């Protein structure tokens, strides 16, 4: 009996092992690994091509050319991948997008992929809400070293936290100087290349009866920060990220001058201070000759102007410390809280959106910057630039573009600086009082 029982046990053990192996194969191919595990064979980019997937992409392309091109590119992807459904959840602003993302994370129901700003991603990384993209980049369905080197180095660096890639560039832009080319030609004025030339030109094109002013501007922290850097300012935030640096040491004089530079022109009527997007209406109706805005504003201006006059872009005029511009736009990140195979499909979709062909279409339709050097140098873009030569300006100044800070508290700093800068331009506050308030409010925000 003892030998008979031992033989039966051996048979049952073999059957159990086979059953467990079968279960293991089933789990690997189904892709239903729990959060924190890698996909089959340890490759985070692998997924079951025969399975149906739904990918939620949260973004802020709710209107205009941006909405149309994203929908078109997404259809291209899903046409080639009929087993994948992409839900484009468009929000009316980046503020709304951030609010919804934060709420979804708290509810443990985030999207697989979303547009994010750098300081959002820093907070999400600190709270373990997004994943490092390094394993995806090096996976079987990843990006080769030559593909990675094709992206502009400054844009890749913009997506790094603690030396690792947590974001890939998507809709990137920088600020440029728009100008009424027909009017400048008529007046024999060349687009200004320095701040001093710009100030002279703004006064020159302003009409004394108030029917035309040099510049229409909705003030923001970005115009102040460009002036701050161009005048000689260095850091915005201390190295430990705990307090502001713009009002410390030698930076203080440049921060104050940046607040004051345009104020006399506002008082003289050469600069018209507006709210929200009213500057676009002023420029399109030829009430203003110049405008400061991102390259992404091009398609909106084009739709409003409708060929009534020729307008162009120029690089932001340089100050004593050089030429600077702000880097705008969001990156793409992948979120925790979804299954590994769902995130692997989201990575595949992300790869498509930042591919050479997709980015070429995206740039031409929206006015955003090429994120890959091969796109900028391609025949398609050379042909495009031959028709719209000023559209090259944004890319040509990309190495001078900066992001003031990745710190999560910087968002509150941005809001405070915008308010105080506006108050100085409108004559409601002195530069000294505004700078003191900016420093205190930013220190409080960064210390939280």
Image (cartoon, grey):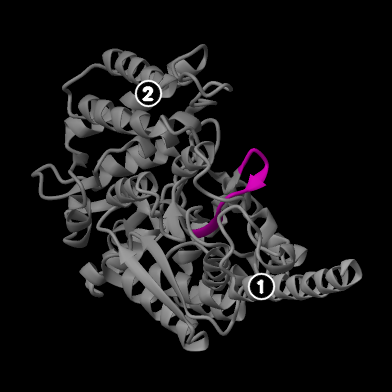
**Residue 249's spot in the image, x, y percent?**
51, 11
Give x and y (percent) for residue 362. 46, 72
Main SS, magenta residues: strand
Closest to the camera, between mark 2 and mark 1, is: 1
Separation of residues labelled 2 and 1 (CA atoms) = 52 Å
- Number of the label disc, if any, that sits on residue 23: 1
Residue 17 against residue 369 in the figure, above or below: below
Q: Secondary structure at mark 2?
A: helix
Crowding near pointer 2: few (<14 within 10 Å), some, many (20+)? many
Task: Identify the element where label 1 is drawn.
Answer: helix
Q: Would residue 233 be found to the left or right of residue 281 on screen?
A: right
Which stretch did the figure color magenta? 161-170
The answer to whether residue 324 is above or below residue 97 is above
- Which comes before the other along the chain, label 2 or label 1? 1
Q: Which residue is mark 2?
A: 445
Q: Is residue 189 visible?
A: no
Q: Nearer the viewer, residue 118 or 236?
A: 118
| Vertical relation: 286 (above or below) 308 | above
Q: Is residue 187 left or right of residue 246?
A: left
Q: Nearer the viewer, residue 92 or 55?
A: 55
Question: Furthest residue to the front?
Answer: 1
């Amino acid at each position: 009996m003892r030998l008979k029982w031992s033989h039966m046990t051996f048979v049952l053990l073999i059957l159990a092992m086979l059953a467990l192996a079968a279960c293991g194969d089933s789990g690997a191919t189904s892709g239903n690994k729990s959060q924190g595990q890698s996909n089959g064979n340890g490759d985070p980019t692998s997924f079951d091509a025969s399975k149906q997937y739904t990918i939620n992409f949260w973004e802020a392309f709710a209107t205009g050319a941006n909405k149309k091109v994203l929908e078109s590119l997404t259809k291209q992807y899903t046409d080639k991948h009929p087993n994948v459904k992409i839900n484009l959840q468009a929000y009316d602003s980046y503020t709304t997008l951030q609010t919804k993302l934060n709420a979804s994370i708290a509810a443990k129901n985030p999207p697989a992929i979303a547009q994010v700003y750098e300081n959002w991603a820093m907070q999400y990384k600190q709270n373990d809400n997004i994943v490092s993209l390094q394993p995806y980049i090096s996976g079987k369905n990843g990006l080769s070293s030559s593909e990675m080197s094709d992206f502009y180095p400054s844009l890749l660096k913009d997506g790094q936290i603690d030396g690792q890639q947590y974001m890939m560039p998507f809709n990137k832009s920088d600020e440029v100087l728009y100008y009424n080319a027909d009017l400048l030609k008529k007046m024999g004025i060349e687009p200004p290349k320095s701040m001093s030339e710009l100030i002279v030109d703004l006064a020159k094109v302003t009409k004394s009866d108030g029917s035309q002013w040099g510049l229409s501007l909705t003030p923001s922290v970005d115009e102040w920060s460009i002036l701050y850097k161009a005048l000689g300012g260095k850091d915005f935030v201390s190295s430990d990220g705990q307090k502001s640096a713009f009002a410390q040491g030698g930076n203080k004089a440049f921060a104050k001058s940046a607040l004051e530079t345009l104020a006399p022109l506002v008082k003289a009527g050469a600069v018209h201070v507006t709210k929200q997007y009213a500057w676009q209406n002023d420029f399109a109706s030829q009430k203003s000759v110049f405008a400061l805005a991102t390259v992404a504003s091009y398609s909106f201006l084009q739709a409003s102007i409708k060929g009534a006059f020729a307008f162009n872009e120029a690089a932001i005029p340089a100050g004593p410390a050089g030429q600077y511009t702000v880097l705008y736009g969001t990156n793409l990140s992948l979120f925790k809280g979804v299954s590994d195979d769902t995130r692997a499909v989201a990575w595949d979709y992300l790869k498509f959106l930042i591919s050479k062909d997709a980015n070429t279409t995206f740039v031409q339709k929206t006015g955003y910057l090429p994120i890959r050097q091969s796109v900028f140098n391609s025949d398609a873009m050379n042909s495009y630039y031959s028709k719209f030569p000023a559209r090259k300006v944004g890319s040509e100044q990309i190495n001078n573009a900066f992001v003031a800070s990745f710190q999560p508290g910087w968002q509150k700093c941005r809001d405070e600086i915008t308010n105080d800068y506006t108050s100085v331009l409108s004559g409601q506050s002195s530069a000294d009082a505004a700078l003191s308030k900016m420093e205190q409010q930013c220190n409080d925000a960064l210390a939280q």
